[in-house]
Amino acid sequence: MKQWVLTKFGAARSVFQLKESETPRPGPGQVLIKVSHSGINFADIVARNGLYDEAPKPPCVIGYDVSGMVEAVGEGVTDMVEGSRVFALTRFGGYASHVVVPRSSVAAVPVNVSMEEATALATQACTAYHCSMELTQLHPGDVVLVQAAAGGVGSMIVQMAKQRGCFVYGTASSSKQSFLKELGVDHAIDYTKEDFANVIKAGPHKKVDVVFDNLGGSEFKKAMSLIGPCGKMICYGATEQIKAATNKLSLLSLAYGFGLFSPIPMLMQSKSILMVNMLVLADNKPQLFQHHLEAVASLAAGGKIVPHVSKVFDFKDIALAHEFVESRQSTGKVALSWSE
């Protein structure tokens, strides 16, 4: 089997090495997948720069999710058929032509979903599902703000919120405004030209019921000012931390930007802040994560969510794929193809 090994932390073009290794065998309760596509997530960029504490240390294989074919199953796995199309969360190790994962991390790819599209389901769609369906109950007429709404998770949250009848504000750069409108965003905000907080405060709603935030820092603090009584802030990332890879002072700025919050005013207004780490969820609540996998597969099968693939790179071009994601040019999912 082939695998991309992260040899050290640093720039994408200098840290990856393609190696040949023995194909693993599935143990009890495990599934061996011949990988068709490996997903590239922003979490991988964070891990590559040494900013993800839970990631393995180099030399290691990173990568969160894959799609492919079941090649073999371990003892006790009776509901997976060899040769069937599947997608899976890998908890790192996904940059490889073959992966072994627990049965609880695998689900069947719907017939109407391509293999490259399926890479968007394990991490990004499941994160969106957990944030917008598990941690909160969205109702028709609710007003929500989705930061980075053109991204992999953000685009899924938008679709799920629209399914629930919500009014959606979404932020993205100038080049992604048309994509937001295609997704169904009611009010697209170009953060390069407008301050999202000022736009919402000056609009008809003034406040929002739920904020979905993956930015952190000062943007988090501004978004908190928009939450009305009984509102929620749901955080699933802090992309501003990537600046700390080249400027450690940015890490202090990030921490300061979050600000300090007393629980008493939040209690009086019945507000809440909820934090999400899907790796921790998958490790500690495997049955819940398996439910999420099946749920997003069902939504995709019914056309209620549509995975968007921004670009597919040949597996040999892993550095280019990382640079593309890191440049913030992508919308939806970016994947590596292992076809030769």
Image (tube, rainbow, N blue to C red):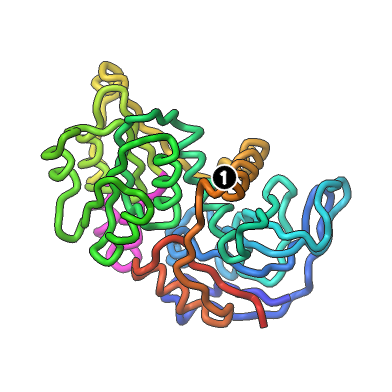
Which residue is located at x 31 percent, y 38 percent? 167
Whether residue 143 sits left or right of residue 78 in the image: it is left
Magenta part of the chain? 236-255
Dot 1 falls on a residue whose secondary structure is helix
Q: Is residue 56 visible?
A: no
**Circle 1 crowding by C-alpha within 10 Å: few under 14, some 14–19, many from 20:** some
Which residue is located at x 26 percent, y 58 percent? 250
Identify the residue at the far top of this view. 268
Q: Position of residue 117 (x, y in %)?
A: 56, 62
Quadrant of residue 162 within the rendered picture:
top left
Task: Quadrant for the C terminus, please.
Answer: bottom right
Main SS, magenta residues:
helix
Q: Position of residue 18 (x, y in %)?
A: 62, 80
Instruction: State yes or no: residue 253 in magenta.
Output: yes
Task: Decide: is 201 above or below 70.
Answer: above
Task: Decide: is 284 above or below 216.
Answer: above
Q: Which residue is mark 1?
A: 299
Task: Decide: is 339 above or below 331.
Answer: below
Quadrant of residue 284 within the rendered picture:
top right
Q: Position of residue 5 (x, y in %)?
A: 60, 73
Out of 328 and 84, give the one closest to the viewer: 84
Instruction: State yes or no: residue 143 in magenta.
Output: no
Whether residue 143 sits left or right of residue 306 in the image: it is left
Identify the residue at the far right of this view. 75
Whether residue 199 sits left or right of residue 330 in the image: it is left
Whether residue 237 sits left or right of residue 285 in the image: it is left
Task: Decide: is 128 above or below 21.
Answer: above
